[in-house]
Image (cartoon, rainbow, N blue to C red):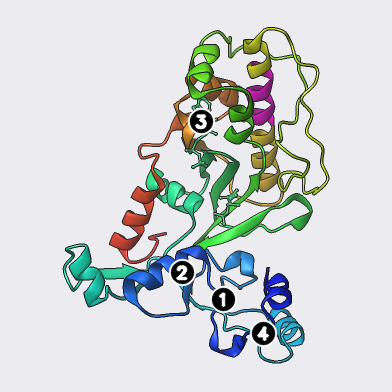
């Protein structure tokens, strides 16, 4: 991304500019201070969540790419940490108290984790939205790029996990939400589907297989749509179970319970299929809106773990 920026906008004076995540920009519009981020958004920029610094290899690489005048990287705060009050303009526009504090943010799937109320190592949240994101709270940090496994810091604990390209977006390619509900009711979740799919929209997977060329596997397609859907739901359940299996194999705390957030959470048949593979209680999250988790984070100042 930074290399593309340099190639396409090389007439700019980058030393006056900040590289920001979308959330950092939106937050800036509220509090008016440029160049502030959090340890969740900056993880994939290469930041170290333990030292809250950018690694030397990244800084040196940027100096090389930008001929010693790279854009400024945002300051890294602990998620939930207060940044400052909203600007007078924002307070007036949205009828907010002028003391309303803006806090450092997080990512959507971590917000979904926090919304569930899970706070014990071993508890997990699967976000079944357009993609499939796993978050397992753990005493230990786990990182393994071979499988697309990484860990976000959460207070004194770690949120281990990964994000697969499979998920609801594949289902939406074939079915409307109404069809998903209606056809799911015709599936026996205790019966194993004989179909061996790997549901993707386009080639490429991140986790639990890290292979940018992995091909979708969606054949053979049975005549009866409920059998096709059964194969898709079961394949995604296997991908989820493989993901949690790998996290534990590489040292994450043992899985005890899985909450589900996102559009797929409302499918009880899928929940039963997933439970068959996961072998731990699987239930809908008490709050499936990620925004609820962001609000909890801001209310508590920092993750209480
Ligand atoms: N009954 C259902 N069973 C399984 N998946 C569903 C069902 N209803 C909606 N979905 C899926 O949920 C996804 C939307 O969930 P959402 O959490 O809004 O996604 P996003 O990641 O885009 O925010 C869609 O891709 C859709 O296929
Ligand atoms: O699939 C996604 C976006 O396409 C996920 O939301 C994302 O990869 C998960 O990221 P994070 O662990 O940083 O919350």
Q: Position of residue 98 (x, y in %)?
A: 18, 73
Q: Is residue 117 visible?
A: no
Find residue 196 and name its label. none
The magenta segment = 230-238
**Going from the N terminus, do you reach mark 2 or mark 1 first?**
1
The numbered mark, 4 or 1, whose residue comes first in the sequence reads 4
Which callout, 3 or 1, points at the residue further toward the start of the chain?
A: 1
Query: Could you tell me which residue is drawn at 54 percent across and 80 percent down?
Result: 18
The residue carrying pointer 4 sits among few (fewer than 14), some (14 to 19) or many (20 or more) residues within 10 Å by Cα, namely: few
Indicate if the residue with disc 3 has its beta carbon within 8 Å of ligand 1.
yes
Which tag is nearer the camera, tag 3 or tag 4? Answer: 4
Q: Is residue 30 left or right of residue 143?
A: left
Residue 224's place in the image compared with 220, above or below, is above
Q: Nearer the viewer, mark 4 or mark 2?
A: 4
Secondary structure state at the residue bearing disc 1: loop
Q: Which mark is residue 19?
A: 1
């Amino acid at each position: 991304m930074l290399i593309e920026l340099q190639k396409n906008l090389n007439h700019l004076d980058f030393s006056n500019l900040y590289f920001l995540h979308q959330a950092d920009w939106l937050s800036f519009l509220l509090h008016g201070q440029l160049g502030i981020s959090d340890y969740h958004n900056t993880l994939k920029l290469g930041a170290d969540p333990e030292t809250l610094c950018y690694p030397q290899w990244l800084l040196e690489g940027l100096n090389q790419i930008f001929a010693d005048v790279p854009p400024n990287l945002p300051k890294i705060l602990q998620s939930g940490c207060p940044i400052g009050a909203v600007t007078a303009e924002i307070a007036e526009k949205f009828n907010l108290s002028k003391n309303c504090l803006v806090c450092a943010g997080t990512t959507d799937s971590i917000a979904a984790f926090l919304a569930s109320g899970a706070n014990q190592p071993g508890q997990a949240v699967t976000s079944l939205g357009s993609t499939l994101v796993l978050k397992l709270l753990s005493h230990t940090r786990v990182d393994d790029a071979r499988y697309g496994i990484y860990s976000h810091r959460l207070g004194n604990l770690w949120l281990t996990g990964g994000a697969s390209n499979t998920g609801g977006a594949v289902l939406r390619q074939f079915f409307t939400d109404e069809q998903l509900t209606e056809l799911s009711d015709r599936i026996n979740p205790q019966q194993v589907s004989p179909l061996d799919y790997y549901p993707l929209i386009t080639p490429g997977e991140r986790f639990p297989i890290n292979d940018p060329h992995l091909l979708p596997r969606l054949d053979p397609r049975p005549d009866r749509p409920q059998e096709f859907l059964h194969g898709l739901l079961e394949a995604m359940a296997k991908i989820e179970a493989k993901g949690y299996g790998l996290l534990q194999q590489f040292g994450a705390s043992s899985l005890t319970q899985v909450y589900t957030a996102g559009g797929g959470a409302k499918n009880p048949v899928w929940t039963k299929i997933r439970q068959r593979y996961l072998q731990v209680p699987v239930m809908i999250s008490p709050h499936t809106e990620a925004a609820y988790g962001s609000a909890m984070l801001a209310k508590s100042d920092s993750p209480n773990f």
